[in-house]
Structures are given as structure tokens and as C-alpha cells.
Amino acid sequence: MSALTELYNEIALCQQCEIAKYRTKVVPGEGAEDADILFIGEAPGWHEDQQGRPFVGPAGKYLDELLASINLKREQVYIANVIKCRPLGNRDPLPIEIHNCRKWLECQIEIIRPKMIVTLGRYSMAMFFPGKSISKIHGTAQKRGNVIYYAMYHPAAALHQQSLRQAIEADMLKIPSFLTQAQNMTEVEPQPQQLKMFEI
Ligand code: URA
């Protein structure tokens, strides 16, 4: 059994949060175990909860189009969320849910060891770029250790707002060059609260 499959089995048993009681399926994440790029969204929505797969609703279709714009299919990357169960009524994730679920994302990062972590939206950005504003840092990358961290708008937000749509499409197009230039990028010092996520 692969390390990710073992992890999925563990995640499926998790009942730490109240929302675990109401889920149809847990949504651990999916993609290549050796992916270079890990995309991290916010939380499963209705479609994801039904299928147990991340980004399979309208935002997911748009994410697929964005990936196609850089000649990637979703099977070639890894797609996960900050939390693995659907918050009721698609409300925002609670701090306690983010806290409880964080260990699963850390395990996924340890197993996949991506070269680049792309945050989609505010909640995943806050984990890797605490205190930053998405309108200021989207489309910019930071290298810490051997990993490039890159913030983008959430596809669901960009889908219906023309200015964000232009931004997310332009930001996606920058990903291949960040990956190829990774060796030459200067590392930045992580802030203390970022250390745990960067020690991989
Ligand atoms: N939005 C997210 O953040 N994640 C999903 O999986 C689907 C929609």
C-alpha cells in the first residue's frame, strides 16, 4: 500500500471535528504521489463531499482549465485542501477545524515532497504566508528550503470576477518559469510561525 493510501485510510477514520459527522465522504486529496506541484484549496464543497475528490465542481472545472493553460493535467499535480471535510452550508472553515486538520496536510507534504506549493485563496495562503494580504502577494513566490511557495486567488472567487480572473490566469502562467528557475531563486528566512510547515 502506498504511503498516501495509508494516510487516506487514517484520514477517513478521523472524527476530531463536529463536521466529520455530517460528511458524505472525506476528501483527502488526489494526484501524483511524486508531484512537483501541490495545490492547496480551502475545503470541500457539495460536489467534493459527494465524490470524495477535491475540486470537482465548477471551481474544479476552472482549475482544470487553468492547469491546461500550462499543459498540465490534474493527474500530474497533487490537489488538496486545508480541511478534509465539508463545512456545513459551505461556511468558512473554523480555526479549530484548520488546527485539527493541519497534521494531515503536513503528512501529505512530507510524503509528496513537492518542489512548489501553490496556495489557492486566503485560508491556505494564511498557513504559509501568515499576516499577508492576497491582493498584495498573489503571483509572487518565495523559496524556503527546497520549496517554492506561491500564492494565487481561489478559482471560485476568480470565476465570477473579471479582474481576479485575469489575475489568476496570469499567475498560473508564471508557474512553469518559477519551477525551472528554482535553483537560482534566493531563499528567504522563514518567520518563526512558518517554521513547522517549512521543516520538510
Ligand atoms: N473549493 C475548495 O477550496 N476546494 C475544493 O475541493 C472545492 C472547492
Image: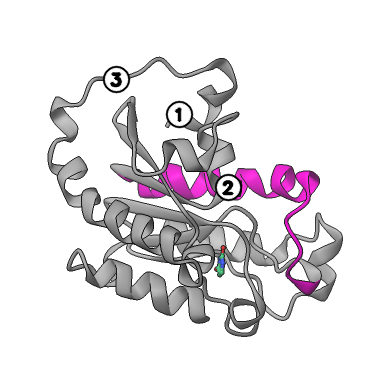
Q: How far apart are marks 3 and 2 (CA)?
A: 23 Å
Other-residue count near label 1 (Cα within 10 Å), few / some / many at <14 / 14–19 / ≥20: some
Residue 16: quadrant of the picture: bottom right
Mark number for residue 198? 1
Tag 3 or tag 1, which sits nearer the N-term? 3
The reply, left or right, for residue 162 in relation to residue 95 is left
Looking at the image, can residue 56 be seen? Answer: no
Kind of element beneath mark 3:
loop
Q: Mark 3 points at which residue?
A: 187
Looking at the image, can residue 10 be seen? Answer: yes
Q: Residue at x 61, y 48 (%)?
A: 123
Q: Mark 3: is the Cβ under 8 angstroms from ligand 1?
A: no
36 is higher (above) or lower (below) than 59: above
**Front label number (1 vs 3):** 3
Tag 2 or tag 3, which sits nearer the N-term? 2
Total count of labels: 3
Q: What stretch is highlighted in magenta?
A: 89-114
Kind of element beneath mark 2:
helix
Q: Mark 2: is the Cβ under 8 angstroms from ligand 1?
A: no
Q: Which residue is drawn at 59% across and 69% down?
A: 27
Q: Which residue is drawn at 52% across and 81% down?
A: 57
Kind of element beneath mark 1:
helix
Mark number for residue 122? 2
User: Between residues 164 and 84, which one lies in front from this camera angle?
Assistant: 164
Q: Mark 1: is the Cβ under 8 angstroms from ligand 1?
A: no
The reply, left or right, for residue 167 in relation to residue 132 is left
